[in-house]
Image (cartoon, rainbow, N blue to C red):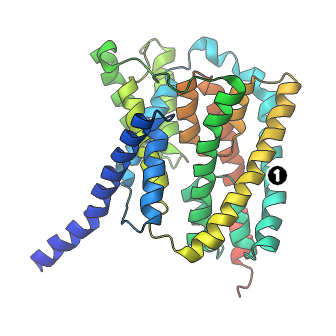
Amino acid sequence: QGRFGTLRKGLAVRPIFISFGVSAFGVAAFQVLGLPLPWLLGPIGACLLAALLRVPLKGFKPLNDAMRTILGVAVGATLTPAVLATFPAMWPTLICVPLMVAVIGLTGVPYFQRLWGYDFATAYYATMPGGLQDMLVFGEEAGADVRTLSLIHATRVLVIVVAVPFLLSIVWNADLTNPPGLPARSVPLHELAIMLASALIGWRGAKMLGVFGASILGPLILTAAVTLVGGLSYRPPAEAIWAAQFFIGMTIGCKYAGVTMAEVRRDLLAGFGFCVILIIIAVVFVEAIVLADLGPGMETLLAFAPGGQAELVVLALIVGADAAFVVAHHVLRMFVVILGAPLAAKLFSATPRD
C-alpha cells in the first residue's frame, strides 16, 4: 500500500515537472528568437504546443496563486495619494464597462447557440468574460458543459494575451522589452520584507473574507494602504514580475492538457471565433472612448480587453501604463459578471435538461 501510494503520488507530480520544463524551454526559445514577452508568451506557446502533442501537463495552482499576489503588490505600490485623486475622473469610462458586458452577452449567446449548437447554459457561461473558476462553478450548477467552458475561456485569455501586445506595439509603439521593474539588488531589504508580508497577509485575509480575485485584490488593497502611509516607495523587482509572468503563462498553456481533436474542431474553433467578436467589440468601445477624449488610448485598450485580469496587469506594468486605471475597470467587469451569474445559475438550474 505504501509503495503504491508513493508511486501514485509520483505519477501525479510528474506532469507538473514536465510543465516546468516545457515552460522553461518556451522562455529560452523566445529569447533566442528575439520574440516579445518571452517570460509570458514563451510558456504559453510551449505548453499549448505540448498539450496538442498529448504531452501530460499540469499546473500547480497554489504556486500560481502565490505568483499572482506579486501583481497585486505591484499595483498597490503605485496607488499614491496623487494616483487615488484621479479615480473620480474615471467614472465616464467605468460606466461603459457594464454596457460592454451587455453587448458581449447579447452577441455571444446567439453565436454559441445558433452557430455551434450549445445549450443555453453553456452558451451563457462561455460568453461571459468573467474569471475562469467562477464561470466553471456557476456553469456547473446551471448544467453547462464544464470542459467546454474551460477550453473556451482558456482560448479567450490566450488569444487576447497574444493579440494585445501586438496592438500595443503597432498602434502605440509600446516597448515590450522594458524590464517590468528595478533589479532585486536595487530594492531595500526591508521593503522586500514589507511586500512579502503584504502579499501573504492580504491574500489570506481576502480569501478568508470570500473576496473574488483574492490573490490579486487582497495584496493590492493591503499594499495600497501601506503605500499611502509611507511604508513603501518601491514596486516588486523585475525578477518577481518575470516569475509571475512565467507561472501565469504556464497555467494558461496547461489548460489545454488532454484536449482531443473533436474538442479542437468544435470548442477551440468556437472559442477562437468568439475571440474575434470580442476583439471587435473591445476595439469599438476603445475607439469611441478615445475619440470622445474620455481616456488614454493604451490604458483604455488594456482596461477593456476582455482577457484575464492578471495577464493584462502584467502588460500594463511592462509598457508603463497606468495600472490602477486598468485594474479599476477589470475589477468592475468581474463584479458585473459575477453579480449576475448566481441569478442566472438559479434560473438555468431550474430549467429542465435534455
In the displayed structure, does residue 241 sit left or right of residue 352? left
Q: Residue at x 35, y 55 (%)?
A: 19
Circle 1 residues within 10 Å: few <14, some 14–19, many ≥20: some
Element at label 1: helix
236 in relation to 216, above or below: above
The amino acid marked with disc number 1 is Ala
| Residue 95 placement (x, y as % from top left) | 81, 36
In the displayed structure, does residue 248 sit left or right of residue 8? right
212 in relation to 123, above or below: above
Which residue is the extreme one toward the bottom? 354
| Residue 169 placement (x, y as % from top left) | 64, 28
State the quadrant of the N terminus.
Answer: bottom left
Is residue 346 visible to the viewer in this orientation of the structure?
Answer: no
Report which residue position mark 1 lands on: 102
Nearest the camera: 203 or 310? 310
79 in relation to 269, above or below: above
Q: Residue at x 30, y 51 (%)?
A: 21
| Residue 320 placement (x, y as % from top left) | 57, 21
| Residue 76 placement (x, y as % from top left) | 51, 25
Q: Residue at x 71, y 72 (%)?
A: 121
The answer to which quarter of the image holds residue 114 is bottom right
Is residue 167 visible to the viewer in this orientation of the structure?
Answer: yes
The answer to which quarter of the image holds residue 298 is top right
Number of numbered discs present? 1
Nearest the camera: 132 or 280? 280
Nearest the camera: 20 or 321? 20
Q: Residue at x 47, y 65 (%)?
A: 52
In the displayed structure, does residue 249 sit left or right of residue 261? left
The answer to which quarter of the image holds residue 286 is top right
Nearest the camera: 231 or 312? 312
State the quadrant of the C terminus.
Answer: bottom right
Which residue is the extreme one toward the front? 33
